[in-house]
Image (cartoon, rainbow, N blue to C red):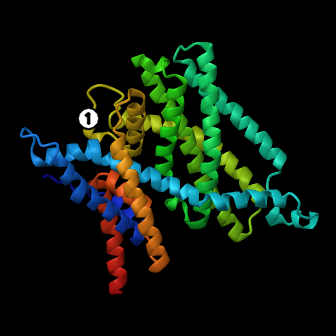
Amino acid sequence: MAFGFSMGYSLALLGAGYLVGLAGAIALFVGMFLAWGIFTPYLSNFEFDSTKNAVDLASSVWSSKVRLIGTGAIAIAALWTLIELLKPVIEGIKEIVKNVKITNQEKNERTNIDLSLKSIFILFVLMVVGLFITFYSFVEDANLSIYYQMLFSFVGTLVSVLIGFFVAAACGYMAGLVGSSSSPISGIGLIGVIISSIVFLVLGVELFQDPMLSKFAVALAIFTTSVILATAAISNDNLQDLKTGHLVGATPWKQQVALLVGCVFGALAIVPVLNLLYQAYGFVGAMPREGMDASSALAAPQANLMSTIAQGIFHHNIEWGYMAFGVFVGILMIIIDNILKGTQGMSLPRLAVGIGIYLPPAKNIPLVIAEFKIYCNATLD
């Protein structure tokens, strides 16, 4: 039986801890307790190795098995959140259709003027065409036949648009309602990479038997997921801005134009910044040059998780049993959360529980400490 974890200290994480809220901190702590107090010790019994000390054994079990449990919990929590948001999203679409029929007097009110449906349709077509060109330029480098180039480009665009439309509506609604910090971005990334990987695997099941093309398939699935995540993240940001504008009486169409411009320049700016960080520090598991200090590499836990899942699907070696158990844990957390909301007026954010299981304690503990410090200060005052 083995368990062991390290505590971390980071001013950035302590600062972020002031934003998670008491319920979020408790949920993270519950996730850590499940991971390191129950799952890791129990699974370590079946992985005993006399050549390893207890801490190394615990870390190995957590990394290879317990994190998959966290993955399943995060995925089902995010999916449930999207299901809960389905009704308000549909109502929102109905409201848009209804607004097309409002009177001229209401239309002429400054705070009711959005971009026209014609403008939105033109922008949508341009976006889809741009996405297809982007996917084609990505697929073209794999030296596939023109059939597969067109097929993967079309399917990648279709998956991105269909899933992106729904997650943008759901995440935007959540961001406008309670803020982007409550939006299930991590879970959406997991759902996106699983769906993308399975779709591409079905389309190219024989093609991806080649090891090199299998690597391309993993990259394509992650590339598709990145489009979905970008859609969700931008909707979070933009809907918070639009809500703020609504509260202060801004003109919607002017805000929307400004946000479109901001998205374009943001996309142009982030590429060189990320490339600069990559060349200077590298990312964990992906260093740009040999001989670089791996301890200085930037951590990207969600990206690593998505890569691991995609590789597992295409290489047929992912341990679905642990993910399925994680889904079961997530369902239990959903039930507990709903019971608390219905009887005690409290909550246990289910997504945060999954994150507490998945992320290393060095990332979670500063968040929990900061929030409990706030709670203690408020109680003493």
Residue linked to disc 1 = 293
Give the percent coordinates (x, y) of residue 320.
37, 40
**Quarter where residue 24 is shown:** bottom left
Task: Please tell me which residue is depicted at 93% across the width and 63% down the height of the picture.
Answer: 104
**Quarter where residue 46 is shown:** top left
Please tell me whether residue 7 is drawn above or below residue 374 in the rendered image.
Answer: above
Task: Please tell me which residue is depicted at 71% across the width and 67% down the height of the picture.
Answer: 246
Amino acid type for the residue under numbered disc 1: Asp
Please tell me whether residue 109 is drawn above or below residue 61 in the rendered image.
Answer: below
Task: Please tell me which residue is depicted at 19% across the width and 53% down the height of the picture.
Answer: 42
For the residue labelled by badge 1, is the local secondary structure a helix, a strand or a loop? loop
Give the percent coordinates (x, y) of residue 56.
15, 44
Q: In front here: 285 or 282?
A: 285
**Quarter where residue 35 is shown:** bottom left
Q: In front here: 4 or 243?
A: 4
Left or right position of 348 against 147: left
Q: Which residue lies furthest to the bottom in this view?
A: 381
Q: In front here: 77 or 250?
A: 77
